[in-house]
Each structure stands twice: as C-alpha cells, then as structure tokens.
Amino acid sequence: MHPTLPIFRFPARTLPGLLVHTARRIPGTVFIRFIDPADPGGTPREITFAALHASVARAAAYLRGVGVGPGDRVLLLAENAPEWQTFSLAAQALRAEPAALFSSLSAAAVQDIARRVRPRVAFVSAPQWAKLAPIAPELAAGGLVAVVSASAIGALPPGVAWADAAAVTADGAPAEDLDALAAAVGEEDPFLLLFTSGTTGRPKGVRLPQRAIVHAIEGGAIATGTVEADLGVHFLPFGHVAGHDQFAIALAQGHGLVMVARREDIERSLALHPTYLFSVPLVYERIRGGVEEKLAGLPAPARALARAALAAAQRVRVDGSRALRDRVLTRVADVLVGRAVRARLGGRIRGLFSGGAPATVATFRFFEALGIPFVELYGMSETAGLVSSNLFGGLRRAGAAGLVSPDHEVRIAEDGELLVRGPLLLSGYLEPEDAAGAYDPDGFFRTGDVARFDEEGLLRIAGRKKHLLVLSTGKKLSPEPIEQAIVSAAPFQGAVLVGEGRPFVSAAVFVAREELARLAAAGQDAAEELLPRVRAALAAFSEFEKPKRLLVIPGAPQDHPDLVTPTLKLRREAVLDRFGAGVARLYGAA
C-alpha cells in the first residue's frame, strides 16, 4: 500500500450546499475581489458570501422563470467574472447542467460545441456572443429561449429574450429559496459539463457530478494547506477544471479570492497582497525567466555571487545539504533574490500551486530554493482535476505528481498506464461513444498517462501513453520529460520531440525572436548554435533520448494560437502538421 493524501471532509456534499453553509457561517466576509477589466483604474469590486448567496438565489429565480429545470443546460461562454459563477451555481441549484466553454476558443469551435450542448439559456459576454450569433437561429430552433449578458448584444432570433445580468441579480429582483433548492440537490446531480482541450480530435464533453467536485476539493484542501485567512489570486479560466477547484475550495473553506479576468491584470492582483497563487506552470516559468534576465544583466562579480547563492539554496532547501558554506549562501540568496521575488508577488506570498501541466524541475527548485513552497497537483477533467498532489506542509519532490487521493482506487496496467476508479470520476461523456475504450473491464478509468510509484510512494508520470515514440532501432521513449528538461534551459520556450520510426530523435524548439535575431546578427546558425545547449540540458538522459538535430521555430508557443490548447499545452499533432516539411528535412527527406 502506498501513502495517500490526507483528507478533510466538508459538511455539505454539493457546491450549492457548501455555499449555503459558508454564507450562514461568515455572511459578511468578503469572498471575491473582482478586478474588472472594464474599469482599469478602479478599485476591485467586493462580494461577500452573503451577497453571492443572494445573487445566486435571484439568478435561480430568473432561470426557473424561463423554464430551466432538471435536464436542461445553461451555456456559459464569458471571461471570468463573479456573474459566471452566479449563474453556474444557480443552474446547479435547479439541478440543471452548466456547460463551460473556454473564452479563447475560435468561433468555429464554439459553434460546434454549442450545437452539441443545445442550451436552454446562454450566459455570454458581448465579445463571445459574436462567436455564437451566426448560429443563434439554429440554437433557438434547438431550444434556446434566453441570453443573459452584462450588456446588450444586438438582435436575437424570434422567441429568444435578452436579460441584463446585473438586473437579474440586483437587490429587489425575485429570488428563490436557495437553501431549500440546495437541500434538494444530490451528489449525482450535475456540477459541470466541461470540454477537454482537444489536443487530438474533437473536444470531449465531460459530465461531472456534484460528488466529483466535492471529493476533489476534500483531497486538495489539506494538500494545499489553505486556510480561512488566505487570499488567493484566481485567474485560471472557468473553462479549465482547475479554475473550479480553486473557486470551490475557497467557497467551502471561506477564504478570499482576487478574481482576474485577463492576464494583463495579474499585476493589479498582486498589489492586493495575496497569500498564494494557483496557475499553470507557464506563469511561474515567466517569473523565473524574468529573474534570470535580471541576473544576466548584473556586473560579473554580483552575477556570479547571486547564481552561486541560488545553487547553494537549492542544495540546502531541496537536497538537504547541511554544509556551512551552503547555509551562508542560502541567506545571501534570500537577500539578493528571495526578497525581490516575494515583493514582486505582493509581499505576503506563502505558497505557489501549479496544475494543468507538469512544471519543469528547474522551476520547482528555483522557488523552493527561495523558501516558497511550490506545490504541484495532478489530475484531468475526467477526475474533477485531482488524482494526486504534493503537500504544502509535507512531502514535495521535483517532477513528482504527489500522493494519490484515498478516494481513488489505483492500478498500474501491464503497459504502465495509470488506471483509477472512485467517486472523483465523471458520470459520463456528453456523447456516449466517447466512452468507448475509456474504461477497463473492471471499471477503472484509463488516464492515458504512463506512471509509476517511487520509493517514497509518490506518483510519477512519465508521459502520455499515446505519445510514446518508437525509433526504428526499437528503442522506446516518453517525450514529455525530455521536452520539460529542454524548456527548463534558456532560451527555449517550448519543445516537441520527434522521431517516430526514425533512427534517432530530433526536436522542434520554440525560441524568442530576439534571441534568434542576436544569433543571426552574429552570423551564427540557430540550429547549430542551440543544439549543444539542448544536449547539455539533457545530461541525465540516455544518449538515444537526446536530439541530434533541431528545427527552430521563432517565438513562444502562445505566439502560435493554432498550435496550443486553451490551457496553453502544445498540440503535438498540430506542430507536426504545420512543420512536417521541416521535420522531414531533418532526416534528409524532401
């Protein structure tokens, strides 16, 4: 038996029930501080738990008034805002199914999903409605009766009404008895319909019940070490299951959130002195990269001291060194680097939480060296965002997915695939055919990830089973750990390993245009100059796992929107499709 995550059981078993419980317990406590992008110079809008309870009750009255009930769907297509959760919770209270879409999706993707959802009501922002408007008559024919938004959105098809979100939730608007509605919601009633990021093929509609999200936050509460006094920065989109996990933990515990709708406003959120951040690794990589750039600009003696101090701090705080010189240099690192990083993060930061993709070992070691716990969580949409987690107040290891929740039964299949079964799992897919092959004969969900347990009982993910590369030599390798190691080294911002059926591996690497311009000005070939840096970053890997040739792609992955998912993961197949000719040239093919 492997050790498992400690669990904290909440008093209610559904999110509407947890809202009622927290609003009764601490009604006047501020829950959300919303940084409104429409008011760039204004102060954040504050919403107490009691105010959210009242708004949800009014939204529920509106939704019921237009005919929403059990079995119906409410489409949510908007940037993060308190009203997003208001209408989601109202739909849940009515035992309807909220359907969440990424606001970064293209119009074609939005329209495809909306047709599949067949909503009765849509909550949208004006920019997002522009994506849906062309198929509005079709949606109306399929059952759409109302569109709710914060501003008028233009003409609607006959039979479809528009409602102002502010008017629906304003003081004095009709309200349902939310406490009674919440009491009637069961653990198998809908929490959310989410759509996978679609790295291959059509995004799957993942139907999550209330039991899944509650079990997920019960596994995450102690793992993250958050408490009622915390103030977290919330900017993961509500199209992403991790964005809901953070919101739900805060709702259940009663701690505050600074809600951010766009990345440009993260700086404003840090001015409110949060105690933690929850993000995808990219944000933390950028923070580390900014520090590295500043260190590179220091005079040589100061630069050498700072880097030696950071290396010593890693040996002390990550590797357990007790050497006197390392301990002295660790204090130097705290003064030269740690103090500035903490100030940059608002001055009160006590932890960083990372999910959605694996973080590089270098990122983990950097923040841990500065005494800032870096806690990685692992999960997927189908498991309500949680399979395992490292511990804020305990065991954390670079490259580890952490301890598995005791609410999962776990198996490692003969081919290394991680299989899970238990109450965190989805209730099904929107289209039943998507469940084909998703479970083994014993009802275990196939995660698609190759995994193992290490000697400490921590889960370690080697990569995606479907991404396994088989060389013509018969050698097999998982590309993800190699790609992460490449990205951890400057100046690489993304990497995709290639070589299926070839005698050796190569890599497509994303490099900042400024760096490529510098190499060109010096008369250097970028691929030839950068290959030794790639191989140096892979010193711990076998020779056959190290690329022999590079395809250099200008810019960061996010500069190529068609190559990344809404969660900023590289679409491997899209990269190969776009740059297939370049990859072929690496192997001497025209």
Image (cartoon, rainbow, N blue to C red):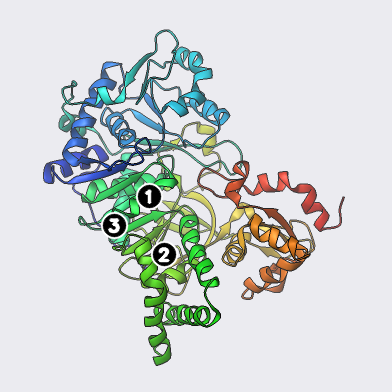
Q: Quick check: 418 left or right of 482?
A: left
- Cα distance, mark 3 to mark 2? 28 Å
| Residue indicated by mark 1 | 422
Whether the residues at callouts 3 and 1 have beta carbons within 8 Å, the answer is no
Vertical order, 441 against 283 (above or below): above
**In this image, 169 relative to 494: left or right?**
left
* Foreground residue among 84 and 560: 560
Tag 1: amino acid: Gly
Q: Residue at x 42, y 48 (%)?
A: 383
- Residue highlighted by disc 3: 273
Identity of the amino acid at label 3? Answer: His
- Which of label 3 and label 1 is nearer to you? 3
Q: Secondary structure at mark 1?
A: loop
- Quadrant assignment, res 207: top left
Where residue 184 sits, quadrant-wise, is: top left
Residue hosting label 2:
402
Residue at 13% x, 46% y is 26
The CA distance from mark 2 to mark 1 is: 18 Å
